[in-house]
Image: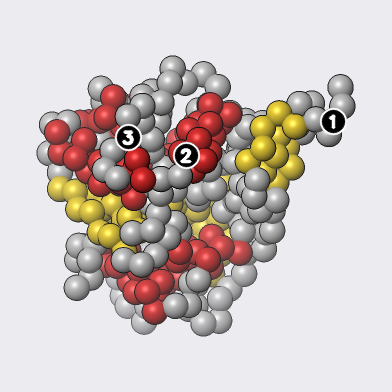
Amino acid sequence: MDSTEIAHNFSPLFIVYKDGTVHRFLGNDVIPPSPDPLTGVDSKDVVISPETAVSVRIYRPKPATATAQPQKLPVLVYVHGGGFCIESAFSPFYDRHVKSLSAEANVVAVSVDYRLAPEHPLPIAYEDSWAALKWVAAHSDGNGPEEWLNGIVDLDRVYFAGDSAGANIVHHLAVRVGSEGIPGLNLKGLILVHPYFWGGKLVGDEEKLRPEERHFMEKLWYVTCPTISGLDDSIVNPEYDPKLGQLAAERVVVYVAEKDALKNRGWFYSECLKKSGWGGTVEVVETKGEGHVFHLFNPTTDVAVDFVRKLAAFINGNGGRHD
């Protein structure tokens, strides 16, 4: 078979050739873990499954002034975006973002590196992230496999966060925690940043999107998860998830961006969650004048710096707006 014959063209992200080869244009750069002299946050990588090579990057903030009984820190489990197909927990974008969030919120962050579609189609990314979550929970008694977590983290205060496809993944993790449970882990809050959901019918002002934009987002679902029943599959559209009301978090904040094609999905998600019988509180916060994952591309702007403060404020119990 001609290896240059294209099966799926998702430029400028990636191309899939008919022989199964995937060429990624973005998200290939990685950087090693290292102490950050600016924030004092240290980091290290851990392979949690030699069979699958699923890994995490742990971020540990600079210790506060030593006391007789140092307080344990909450845990943030972060899952990166990239349409399920590009990027990693080790990319410069995500290393910088999660490191700054660990410092600002004073949390131990565990950033998950899952296997990518289309070579590893969904639900593999969900299963890899679930395996990482169980690995974190194994430290609840202080006798887990990683010294950086033992005796340092408070697994009664766990938060999930993710952007774009990562927000989709942490949503499903939160529902699974609620329906199945994970002993030793208490999910307090869920942060969805510009979440990648879709559906069989358009919502909000999605009819104003260019046809090629809609086609791109819809087709990507069939390539990343060939087994879905359609665009109203619960993987794609939480409206049709019968377990939505079992979502484990007490508080949810959904961040959307005014110029993001996925903006309406974030608002719609909050409506579905409210109607599901779920007993927590959900808030939607919209960033004006910005596009999809603006804070990753331009992290030093005032609006991006303030955005990280908002995320930290939610983790620290001060709501999502940080007004």
The CA span between labels 2 and 3 is 12 Å
Left or right: 68, with 145 as reference point: left
Q: Which residue is drawn at 51% across and 82% down?
A: 38
Q: Residue 103 at x, y = what percent?
A: 42, 72
Precedes in sequence: disc 2 or disc 1: 1
| Pointer 2 residue | 211
Spatial CA distance of label 3 from label 1 is 37 Å
Identify which residue, 312 or 154, lies in the foreground.
312
Q: Residues within 10 Å of mark 3 (few under 14, many from 20)?
A: few
Marking on residue 3: 1
Q: Can you say which quadrant of the picture contains the N terminus?
A: top right
Q: Mark 3 points at which residue?
A: 202
Q: Earlier in the sequence, mark 3 or mark 1?
A: 1
The residue shown at (54%, 48%) is 82
- The image quadrant of residue 306 is bottom left
Q: Which amino acid does label 3 sit on?
A: Leu
